[in-house]
């Protein structure tokens, strides 16, 4: 019986990883009704990470109300507990993710990571001794200052007035007071799950690379980058070390920078973490094909995105990997084959709305082309 392991990431703004799994499975079963399909929804630390884990791991869901990306926004969110309640898994996108705002609302000059800090406080209140924070899918560019403020850090301007920090006013910071930073942070381990390697500032930093997709105009990008530079310099004066240039500091609009600076967090590959937790390697070993995918496969895919991480793992077992994506701007390197699911010339809105159908159809079309391979086995 043909065996397929289906392990996609989410298709941004159109399909969750779980929905992508189901669409691929429908495509396979329409051609080979008796095929064995093992669905393992994936993530790289970005949006969908928590839901992917909750599909395959025994996690306790904890609900909480936090501030959304904008100060006036309050949302019902959740995180999870594992290891008998001693480890919390937090997905920042559940509090301050891009999906929580309509396109016309997105403005990284105004958005904040304060809600993610509130989620961390909720976890501390439950007595955890380890926190894993999945970064990605953010709509923020505040260098994690909002999170720091929620945890007790004070930011003051030249007049001594406390700032309600966001991406647009970091250049007003004159003094940082860590006196009231939650003392419990000294006694827990915090791990950042992320596959972003960008530094905080500069042409490859958070603002220039990720700002435009969060609603930043070119002028905003310049201002945001300058603001982050000012903020990072002030933080360095207080903590006695420079972290802005560290690999991964720019993840989630610089949230990783704040977690490292104020919480002594360290970074782990998000995709590797998910693959370990879901036991993906064990599922792969007897597979004929591994199917993966995400919304866009491009030059960033090889920098540690989920699809490439899945392909590298499958190579260890000499199993061909087929990647599906809405947009393809990459050669086949690292994959057996890459399939663009969208019909040529389709408008983006229609592509997003009908992503499940196109993914199912593309999977079925691909399988019809290769099903003779199974007859030869």
Image (cartoon, rainbow, N blue to C red):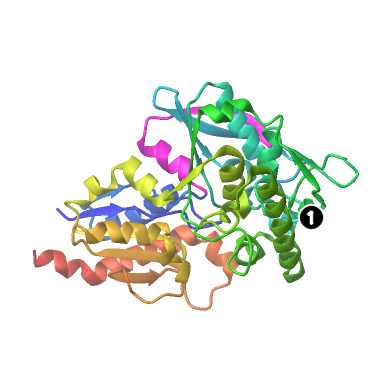
User: Looking at the image, which is closer to me, 159 or 63?
Assistant: 159
Q: Residue furthest front?
A: 240
Q: Residue furthest left?
A: 377
Position above or below: 162 against 321:
above
User: Looking at the image, which is closer to me, 225 or 341?
Assistant: 225
Numbered disc 1: secondary structure: helix
Image location (x, y in percent) of residue 96 = 64, 45
User: Looking at the image, which is closer to me, 356 or 138?
Assistant: 138
Dividing the picture into quadrants, the one containing residue 118 is: top right
Image location (x, y in percent) of residue 331 = 37, 77
Image location (x, y in percent) of residue 142 = 69, 51
Image location (x, y in percent) of residue 64 = 61, 29
Say which residue appears at 35% left-offset and 70% top-offset: 338
Left or right of 229? Residue 269 is left
Residue 53 falls within the magenta-colored stretch: yes
User: Looking at the image, which is closer to me, 183 or 135?
Assistant: 183
Say whether residue 298 is visible: no
The residues colored magenta run 47-67
- Tally of numbered tags: 1
Left or right of 98? Residue 335 is left
Residue 51 falls within the magenta-colored stretch: yes
In which quadrant of the rendered image does the C terminus lie? bottom left
Say which residue appears at 48% left-offset and 51% top-offset: 194
Say which residue appears at 11% left-offset and 65% top-offset: 375
The residue tagged 1 is 171
Q: Tag 1: Cα neighbours inside 10 Å, few (<14), some, or many (≥20)?
A: some
Say whether residue 15 is visible: yes
Q: Residue furthest right?
A: 159
Left or right of 216? Residue 88 is left
Left or right of 335? Residue 162 is right
């Amino acid at each position: 019986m043909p065996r397929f392991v289906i392990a996609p990431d989410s298709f941004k703004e159109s399909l969750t990883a779980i929905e992508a799994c189901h669409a691929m499975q429908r495509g396979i079963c329409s051609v080979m009704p008796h095929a064995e399909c093992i669905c393992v929804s994936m993530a790289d630390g970005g949006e969908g990470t928590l839901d992917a884990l909750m599909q395959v791991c025994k996690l306790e869901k904890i609900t909480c109300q936090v501030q959304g990306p904008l100060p006036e926004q309050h949302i019902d969110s959740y995180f999870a507990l594992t290891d008998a309640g001693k480890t919390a898994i937090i997905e920042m996108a559940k509090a301050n993710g891009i999906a929580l705002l309509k396109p016309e609302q997105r403005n990284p000059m105004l958005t904040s990571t304060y809600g993610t800090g509130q989620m961390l406080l909720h976890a501390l209140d439950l007595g955890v001794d380890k926190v894993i924070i999945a970064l990605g899918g953010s709509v923020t560019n505040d260098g994690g200052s909002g999170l720091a403020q929620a945890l007790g850090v004070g930011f003051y301007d030249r007049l001594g007035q406390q700032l309600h920090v966001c991406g647009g006013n970091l250049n007003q910071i004159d003094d940082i007071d860590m006196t009231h930073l939650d003392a419990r942070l000294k006694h827990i381990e915090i791990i950042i799950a992320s596959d972003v390697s960008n530094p905080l500032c500069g042409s490859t930093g958070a603002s220039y690379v990720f700002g435009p997709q969060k609603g930043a105009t070119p002028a905003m990008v310049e201002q945001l980058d300058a603001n982050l530079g000012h903020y990072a310099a002030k933080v360095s004066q207080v903590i006695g070390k420079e972290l802005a240039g560290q690999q991964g500091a720019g993840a989630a609009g610089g949230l990783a920078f704040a977690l490292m600076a104020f919480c002594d967090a360290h970074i782990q590959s998000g995709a590797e973490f998910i693959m370990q937790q879901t036991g993906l390697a064990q599922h792969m070993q007897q597979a004929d094909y591994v199917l993966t995918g995400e919304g866009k496969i491009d030059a960033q895919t090889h920098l540690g995105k989920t699809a490439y991480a899945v392909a590298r793992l499958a190579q260890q077992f000499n199993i061909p990997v087929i990647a599906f994506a809405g947009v393809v701007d990459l050669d086949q390197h690292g994959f057996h084959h890459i399939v663009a699911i969208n019909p040529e010339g389709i408008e983006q809105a229609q592509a997003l709305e009908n992503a499940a159908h196109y993914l199912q159809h593309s999977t079925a079309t691909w399988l019809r082309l290769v099903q003779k391979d199974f007859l030869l086995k």
